[in-house]
Image: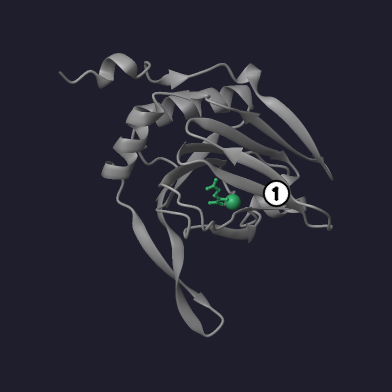
Amino acid sequence: MFQTSLLEPTPGVGPLTLAHRTQLGDGAWVDVLPGWLHGADGLFTALADGVPWVAERREMYDSVVDVPRLLAFYREGMALPDPLLDEARGALSVHYETRFTTAGLCLYRDGRDSVAWHGDRVGRGSHEDTHVAVVSLGATRPLLLRPRSGGPSRRFPLAHGDLLVMGGSCQRTWDHAIPKTTRPTGPRISIQFRPRGVR
Ligand SMILES: O=C(O)CCC(=O)C(=O)O
Ligand SMILES: [Fe+2]
């Protein structure tokens, strides 16, 4: 008998008041809430199978290279690929008093997939405080943050169903990355909710 539905909790999100804030310095902070999303197994499968993932290629200096992850982007007004993402976005918008209008999705197929050091500084994030909320599904990967002014990096391992919100000056004053790893690593999907004009 197929009993997965008996073991999988009802899809939904937990209370955001439980998020733990870390002040990073330079006006930047992160909130972390492990296991915020319930029903992460079903969401992972729905997104892995249902999202039209794109393998992008980008110009780097004088060559064209594969972006080391698969991508999908839901612009403002586009229907999200799963109702649980609508619920997550609604809860985040209320709690952070921010209208999260876009959703970026990344699929890291294995440890060779990654995102290099960067801030989400296309648009408003380059000169204003913003929120970028990341929901993580699947394999645990660390999100690293390091101050642009110099100094050691901070490591936030993100597991299945975890939430991390970057806030304050984080996109301007800190960079973040998901490094490659040579350890055997299963697939990970991340969902980034951003306000209008932040990318
Ligand atoms: O996958 C993540 O958790 C972060 C992705 C990211 O930083 C981005 O797409 O800008
Ligand atoms: Fe980013």
- The quadrant where residue 138 appears: top left
Percent position (x, y) of residue 123?
62, 55
Q: Is residue 16 left or right of residue 75?
A: right
Question: In this picture, is 156 found above or below 52?
Answer: above
Closer to the camera in the image, 137 or 171: 137
Which quarter of the figure is the N terminus placed in? top left
* Residue 81 seen from this side: no
Dot 1 amino acid type: Leu
Percent position (x, y) of residue 78?
37, 41
> In the rendered view, how is the structure colored?
one colour
Residue at the extreme front of the image, as rendered: 183
Q: Secondary structure at mark 1?
A: strand
Closer to the camera in the image, 28 or 153: 153
Disc 1: which residue: 145
- Which residue is at a point 65% across and 40% down the rendered structure image? 156
- Which residue is at a point 31% across and 45% down the rendered structure image? 51
Percent position (x, y) of residue 158?
56, 38
Please count the marks in the image: 1
Residue at the extreme left of the image, as rendered: 1
- Which residue is at a point 76% across and 33% down the rendered structure image? 22
* Residue 17 seen from this side: yes
Percent position (x, y) of residue 170?
73, 45
Label 1 near ligand 1 (CB < 8 Å): no
Q: Residues within 10 Å of mark 1 (few under 14, many from 20)?
A: many
Question: In this picture, is 180 found above or below 65?
Answer: above
Q: Is residue 90 left or right of residue 148?
A: left
Q: Is residue 144 left or right of residue 76?
A: right
Q: Is residue 144 left or right of residue 135?
A: right
